[in-house]
Amino acid sequence: MDNLLLGFELFTYILLMFSLGFYLIQNLQWYNYKITRVLVNHKKKSWHILYFFMPVLLYYVVYTIFAYSFYLLYLPILFLWYKDQDKKLVVTGRVKRFFAVLLIFTSFFAYLKLVGHFDIYSVITPLILSVLVSKLIEYILFLGYKKKAKKKLDSKPNLKIIAITASYGKTSIKNFLYKILKSKYKTQMTPRSVNTDVGIIQDINQNLRDDTEIYIAEAGARKNNDILKISNLLNQNYAVLGQVGTAHIEYFKSEENIIEAKSKILASSKLTKAYVHKSAIKNQVNHQKLDIYSDKVTDIDSSLDGLSFCLDINGKKEKFDTNLLGSFNAENLACAILLAVELGVELSIIKDIVSKIPPVEHRLQVISKTPKYIIDDSYNGNIDGMIKSYELIKQYNGKKIIVTPGIIEGNETLNVELALKIDEVFDLVIITGTQNKTILNRTINKEKIILKDKANLEEVLKQETNEGDLVLFSNDAPTFC
């Protein structure tokens, strides 16, 4: 009987450790494996109390009867919590290594308890050690991967590298540029929204082909030197410093700090030319290799039928037409066009590609025009882009519905500004997520629905919309926000 009880205690301890480890690694993956971001920047810190600190506290306080609350309460609510997440844990090599390390430390501390060194199984210490040792392992592996990627790039002296950063529009510029350049060159780009040094290194090592002539990389930042790390890795020939604004201001504290961090995209010894938006020239107005592309765009005409604009190319005004929506895409396209001209793509070919270029997924992407006009702008999360999209929607002659969580990486002032614009344009507002619901609900006077569970969105839209209505999905928030 004693052996049976001992085995049950041991099994419960191991299951507890892996449950806590699971919660921990899920949150670390959401926040790019930065423990400080999990602790400081997490939008739902109450989860940490409920799913991590509370079970640990109960384990130590009511150890003798802990198993009852663990099996009957904690495991079921942890399961339901995970079931509700829309961004579930991706079991990568890093995740597997974390659990392997956790198993080693859990086994070691279980052994110490069994041989009488402790009166109770240790929980906090093996978790801390697992995180620290895992971080050390990943750092050592990262240095090896980085060296391999650098060696691969150095072995391709004729490869032209383009690095793109911005607060807004960097993914769109990357995609537009890729569409144009691949008409003449063997071109590759970083996939999806991969924009960290770790992600770029992985892409270079795994995907960069030997015959690639141009490599386009997107560069993002949460810290001051993130862009500099990418510039040091790529040593790019061309740089794009797009529109800079208040996106991620919670990390940088001021727009000046954002500009300073983003400007490090210019820190390349091989830099031939840099294409810079006027919003980002405060600290480098005298840089000799700059082309202020946004100043060359004129005569923008944006409607729900498409976009046209003129662009000054080598002193001559050229007109471009495209099916893309949104006036801001004129500047995004202008940047891509000017860089393509610099790299020798014929203007007639560029114009043809621009006229047919598809939207980037989830960025003012028209899903359908009938029976309901549905536009997916769920990857647009900045104040400027969102308000410009609302100005576009304002032209629609019919009922207008918006589905939005507001601005996730923004303060109350920005969300109030957004809410006032929403109130001006839309007839029905469906508020998703919890982060900004109080601000939006308080500021918006139009008819509102506060959606507690996004799983019910389809049913709500069926009930509240009719043929001829326009539905805009404006920004999106994962359930952990």
Image (tube, helix red, strand yellow):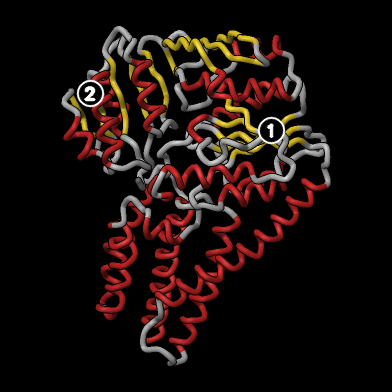
Q: Is residue 475 above or below residue 235?
A: above
The residue carrying pointer 1 sits among few (fewer than 14), some (14 to 19) or many (20 or more) residues within 10 Å by Cα, namely: some
Q: Nearer the viewer, residue 150 or 449?
A: 150
On the rendered image, what quadrant is the C terminus found in?
A: top left
Q: Is residue 312 above or below residue 216?
A: above
The furthest residue to the front: 286
Mark 1 or 2: in front is 1
Give amino acid for label 1: Lys
Q: Is residue 334 above or below residue 80?
A: above
Instruction: Determine which residue is flagged by label 2.
Output: 423
Q: Nearer the viewer, residue 416 or 280?
A: 280
- On residue 474, the disc is none
Give amino acid for label 2: Asp
- Tell whether 436 sits left or right of 341: left
Instruction: Determine which residue is flagged by label 1.
Output: 273
Q: Is residue 411 above or below residue 386?
A: below
Q: Nearer the viewer, residue 166 or 303?
A: 166
Where disc 1 sits, the SS reads strand
- Residue drawn at x 60%, y 50% is 228
Q: Which of the 4 quarters of the picture holds residue 84?
A: top left
- Tell whether 153 sits left or right of 351: right
Q: Does residue 190 appear in the picture of this structure?
A: no
On the rendered image, what quadrant is the N terminus found in?
A: bottom left
Q: Does residue 382 appear in the picture of this structure?
A: yes
The residue carrying pointer 2 sits among few (fewer than 14), some (14 to 19) or many (20 or more) residues within 10 Å by Cα, namely: some
Where disc 2 sits, the SS reads helix
Q: How far across and how far down the image is residue 48, in percent?
A: 33, 60
Q: How far across and how far down the image is residue 38, in percent?
A: 40, 57
Q: CA distance from mark 1 to mark 2?
A: 43 Å
Q: How far across and how far down the image is residue 343, in percent?
A: 74, 25
